[in-house]
Amino acid sequence: MINTLPSPRISAVSAILPAYNDYATIASMVLTTRKALTQVTDDYEIIVVNDGSSDFSAQILEELSQLIPELQVIHHPYNQGYGAALRSGFSAAAKEWVFYTDGDAQYNPLELIQLVQVLEGNIDLVNGYKISRSDPLYRIIIGWLYNVSIKFLFSLKLKDIDCDFRLIRRELFDRIKLESNSGAICLEMVKKFQTAGITFAETPIHHYHRPVGFSQFFNWRHLWRSANELIRLWWKLVIKQV
């Protein structure tokens, strides 16, 4: 159930939606994100990074950009990876706060309100954590093992490292340099922010079954690449501490 309490307000938000072959969901995600933003701020922009989609995503987004003045579309000429898409979005963000979630509709942008409600004092980042995971059993098990292992290996304090539903002060991206092109960017980002001493808050959010398509993460080739990148990050961020 979506929170129905009066919505708090914040100054300005850049909402970033990375998208890869999400033609069936990206339009509704843009429109729902726009509705969510109007509930928490009067100053916002929506940035969709089309990461080399081979479906109709590009055409849909170009048509939407003609109808929604707050929408900016960034097209990657080829698929560069989730991390690369996020880094493009973060670089383009111009507002005081950055909110991001995925374009595949596994999270509801209207729950941005929950993130804003826990902002107070010197909090720099609000991290959502999944109340429960709406995935097949094998993915729930793999996700749990990943989360527990990564928290231990990288000494991370958040409940859910792999929840792509976050609200972040934009100025924080001036204090760290993100390099990952894969989904490991979430781990890299959280670890570098934690090392920099920023203040986190957490709040529960819902996770939904992916309505169409399939995850790019759960295939052996991708898992092998991700494992190599995780080892590289562990060596760099934990052992060398650079």
Image (cartoon, rainbow, N blue to C red):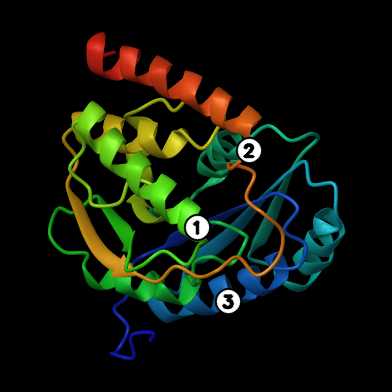
Q: Amino acid at mark 3?
A: Thr
Sequence-earlier tag: 1 or 2: 1
Q: Secondary structure at mark 2?
A: loop
Q: Which label belongs to residue 210?
A: none
Marks 2 and 3, how far apart in space? 30 Å
Left/right placement of residue 47 relative to residue 149 reads right
Q: Residue 22 location, x and y as percent?
A: 72, 58
**Quadrant assignment for the N terminus:** bottom left
Q: Is residue 66 above or below residue 36?
A: above
**Of residues 141 and 196, the one drawn nearer to the viewer in this rendering:** 141
The residue pinned by badge 1 equals 101
**Quadrant assignment for the C terminus:** top left
Q: Amino acid at mark 2?
A: Asn
The residue pinned by badge 2 equals 219
Sequence-earlier tag: 3 or 1: 3
**Of residues 182 and 225, the one drawn nearer to the viewer in this rendering:** 225
